[in-house]
Image: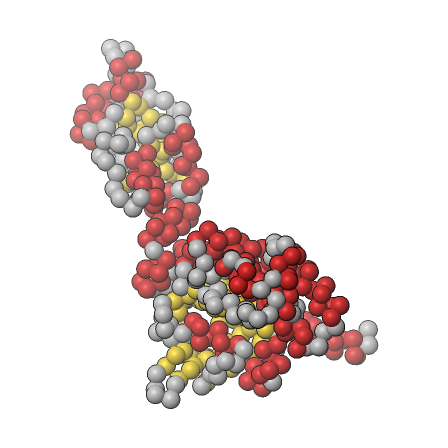
Amino acid sequence: MSQKDLTDWSLFIGRGLMSYLKYSHITKRYQNGAIGVNDVSFEADAGEFIVLIGTSGSGKTTLLRMINRLVTPTKGELILDGQNIKKMDAIALRRKIGYVVQSIGLMPHMTIRQNMMLVPSLLKWSKERQEEKATELIKLVDLDESILDRFPAQLSGGQQQRIGVARALAAEQDIILMDEPFGALDPITREHVQQLVKKLQMKLKKTIIFVTHDMDEALKLATHIGVMDHGQLIQYATPNEILQHPASEFVAKLIGEERLLAAQQQTMTVTELMKTQPATVLPSASIRQAIEIMQQRSVDTLLVVDETHHLLGVMSLAMLDQSFGHATRVADIYSEDIESVYSDDLLRSIVGRLLQNELNYIPVVNQEHVLLGLVTRRNLVELMYNTVWGTPINENEVKS
């Protein structure tokens, strides 16, 4: 391998290790002293779907508009594909970036074909190439070719937004900026266009920076979410990380209690829901002692453990009834046939076992089979009710 080949290979490796987009200590201070963005830093790899979310005035759109130099940072560096955006020609930069906004911005006096090919025509593409690209894109956004010769006013809002997405892809841009693009659409159309954009992003491997105030939209689309508040980046993480570990009370409120509870179910271990100090009895205890424990604890079953609290089995009131007059000690009648779970098992892994097998509880043990507690059917159903409805259940609905 020649020295030139080695140099080219080193540059290729170095480029692969670099982030495609990097905000480094970005601040925007306006002339009146107001701070739009305050010391924001984060990175994104090529092909990611980055969603910036926050309340109105949080700085999310300001960050987005810095990429195509509609807003200039007061401090900090913004690097796109290895280049400092500040040093790039603004017009050339904008032609390399796709842009989709809520108002769509289609020219009313131009056909859909002309609207879609606006940037390619500025880049002096041949008519043949433009024709091919227009046909390719209209199919890509699941619209009929006949639409190409219509005018924007002849299209529905959802169709216009699809054209806006297609136009952003027309010049084969690697990065697309989307500023609350679906805010004016009805819920059903919005969901369809969201699915389309996610499908296109995954298929074409485009980098998308997307601004929204809708957490459901962010969780559905993003590979990483940046949560903004008063110009500061409060948290930058994957959707799952944000759901499981919100960085602040503000982030938790933005997510919402219902989503947090649903996420909690996915990662909660049985230890977090189990009841400690279950009713137990030694195998050497007399039947009379076992009955007294049941009466004291108001239960109809006892977990049988040895002196070091290892789980051995279970003894129930039904077993006592069947052996009445024959057995004298717990050891004579208890059953070793009992299910148990480990303390680090995920709660979701035992849902089926509890509900489908109609068990009232499952004992929780450690790796040495020492009894730690139990998860009851009631605990589990309460959690599920809270997740779905957010209200406590009726005392009589579930047996403990």
Q: In which quarter of the image is residue 312?
A: top left
Residue 107 x/y as whole percent: 55, 71
Reply above or below: 357 against 92.
above
Residue 60 x/y as whole percent: 43, 71
Q: Can residue 54 be seen in this view?
A: yes
Q: Is residue 42 left or right of residue 33?
A: right
Residue 296 x/y as whole percent: 17, 29
**As rendered, which of 316 and 156 lies closer to the eye?**
156
Q: Which residue is drawn at 66% across and 77% down?
A: 122
Q: In which quarter of the image is residue 354?
A: top left
Give the residue furthest to the bottom.
31
Q: Which residue is drawn at 37% across and 72% down?
A: 58
Reply above or below: 61 against 77.
above
Q: Which residue is drawn at 35% across and 34% down?
A: 363
Give the residue furthest to the top.
325
Reply above or below: 250 against 67.
above
Q: Can residue 47 be seen in this view?
A: no
